[in-house]
Amino acid sequence: QVQVVESGGGLVQAGGSLRLSCAASGSFFNSAGWHRQAPGKQRELVATITYGSRTNYADSAKGRFTISRDNAKNTVYLQMNSLKPEDTAVYYCNVKFPTTTGRDLEVWGQGTLVTVSS
């Protein structure tokens, strides 16, 4: 059984940094991503990373956030710097595991809350 567990959220002042972790278990994973959902808003993509570590970022994350992965630990990270109050949201990890059908199995984490105070 595959699952993902996020950690690293918390309260930080504007301008500060946090690193989120998403540990996958049960299998190695192909691509992964971080999404976030602020109160009253729709969930939005923050960043993605492929198995070969090719990355993609939302405009709001470019230059401040870095997604990375450690395949030996089966973990994906989101380093967030220069945090702003508008970054306050629940952050979700999304991981795609390979299957025998050829279609990846998409698994979401439970979410971790990031609160940025002004």
Image (cartoon, grey):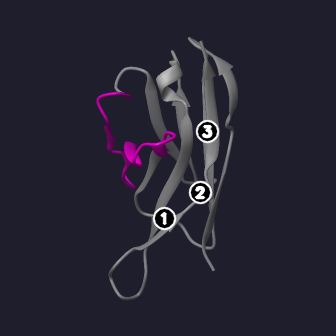
The mark total stands at 3
Q: Position of residue 105 (x, y in %)?
A: 44, 75
Q: Are marks 2 and 1 in contact (CB under 8 Å)?
A: yes
Residue 78 drawn at (x, y percent) = 53, 37
In the image, residue 80 sits, relative to residue 76, either above or below, namely: above
Up the image or down, 118 lies above or below 105; here it is above
The part of the image, by quadrant, that contains residue 106 is bottom left
Q: Nearer the viewer, mark 3 or mark 2?
A: 3
Name the residue rendered at 51%, 68% in the picture. 107
Mark 2 is surrounded, within 10 Å at the Cα level, by few (under 14), some (14 to 19) or many (20 or more) other residues, namely: some
Q: Quadrant of the N terminus?
A: bottom right
Say which element carries label 3: strand
Q: Residue at x 61, y 51 (%)?
A: 111
Which residue is disc 1 drawn over? 29
Residue situated in front as seen by the camera: 44 or 19: 44
In the image, what residue type sits under mark 2?
A: Asn
Q: Locate residue 94 relative to residue 111 in the image: left or right.
A: left
Q: Is residue 39 left or right of residue 47?
A: right
Residue type (three-letter) at the residue carrying disc 1: Phe
Quarter of the image with the C terminus in it: top right
Q: Is residue 50 left or right of residue 4?
A: left
Residue 92: image tag: none
- In contact (CB < 8 Å): disc 1 and disc 3: no
Q: Which mark is residue 74?
A: 2
The residues bearing labels 2 and 1 have C-alpha atoms spaced at a distance of 7 Å
Distance between mark 3 and mark 2 Cα atoms = 14 Å
Residue 91 percent coordinates (x, y): 54, 44
Residue furthest bottom as drawn: 101
Name the residue that disc number 3 marks.
Answer: 20
Of pointers 1 and 3, the one earlier in the residue sequence: 3
Magenta range is 36-61
